[in-house]
Image (tube, helix red, strand yellow):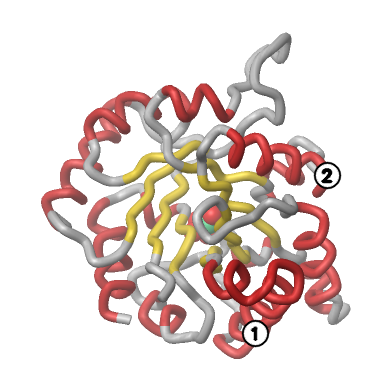
Amino acid sequence: MRRKLAAGNWKMNGLKGQLAELDKLAAAHPSPEVDVLLCPPATLLAAAALQSPFSIGAQDCHANDAGAHTGDISAQMIKDAGGKAVIVGHSERREDHDEHSDIVRAKARAAQAAGLTAIVCMGESLLEREAQNTLDIIGGQLAGSIPDNATAENLVVAYEPIWAIGTGLVPSLAQIGEVHAFIRARLERRFGAGVGLGVRILYGGSVKPDNARDIFAVPNVDGALVGGASLKAADFSPIISALEAS
Ligand code: PGA
């Protein structure tokens, strides 16, 4: 059985005061029946890992362990700061920083080598969806972004349609189900049933308290990667509860 995962991505939001939301969340969920992971900005990572009973992760890492890469942080540094996971290949990184799947794969490999879980994101644009290219795009991103040494512990896949991120638009449940089933089948084909059935597949893109329950009922949706609604405990808490009830 795959353990469900509610992951929050704070993106470039949060000063020190934001850490109070972690306390509120912990008070609301003293012993959650699902895994809970929060990915604050790098500036809050170490403090969050000290303070929070939940797992803490980062939003990106460099593919190298160390070196002359001003402004970057490595997977080893994330691990050293108390992180357990790192998001790689988020569409905002792919777009803002021109990160292609080969870079994403190298980052995921670095994360896994450091003992972190790599949360590898992928998703189609609206143009690609309208041209009915979604599964081709996802297939390409899966093949290109995921390292060969994936295990059920060191890999999580996040399906995040670009047009659904931060927009309030959500694919139909049938569309989500189609992509998640496709990802599951590709993982099984590449890694065999053991790993393929064990890797968790998250849905991300405008997950909110009022749509979480329906999304979590879709087969092969093992949780969510939540942006805006993870910033406030009052919003993220009902999403965690919906996942626990699913
Ligand atoms: P959103 O972001 O929940 O604000 O749409 C999701 C994400 O980008 O991970």
User: Callout 2, which amino acid?
Assistant: Asp
Which residue: 69% across, 38% down? 107
Which residue: 68% across, 61% down? 162
| Percent of width and height locating residue 91 | 69, 51
Label at residue 175: 1
Residue that badge 2 annotates = 102
- Is label 2 within 8 A of ligand 1 (CB to nearest ligand atom)? no
| Percent of width and height locating residue 192 | 68, 73
- Please tell me which residue lies in front, 145 or 8: 145
Among the two numbered marks 1 and 2 on one chain, the one whose residue lies closer to the N terminus: 2
Q: Is residue 210 left or right of residue 76?
A: left
- Please tell me which residue lies in front, 165 or 224: 224
Q: Quadrant of the N terminus?
A: bottom left
Frontmost of labels 1 and 2 is 2
- Answer yes or no: do the residues labelled 1 and 2 have beta carbons within 8 Å? no
- Quadrant position of residue 229: bottom left
User: Callout 1, which amino acid?
Assistant: Gln
Cα gap from disc 1 to disc 2, whole angstroms: 27 Å
| Percent of width and height locating residue 92 | 67, 46
Q: Is residue 44 left or right of residue 20?
A: right
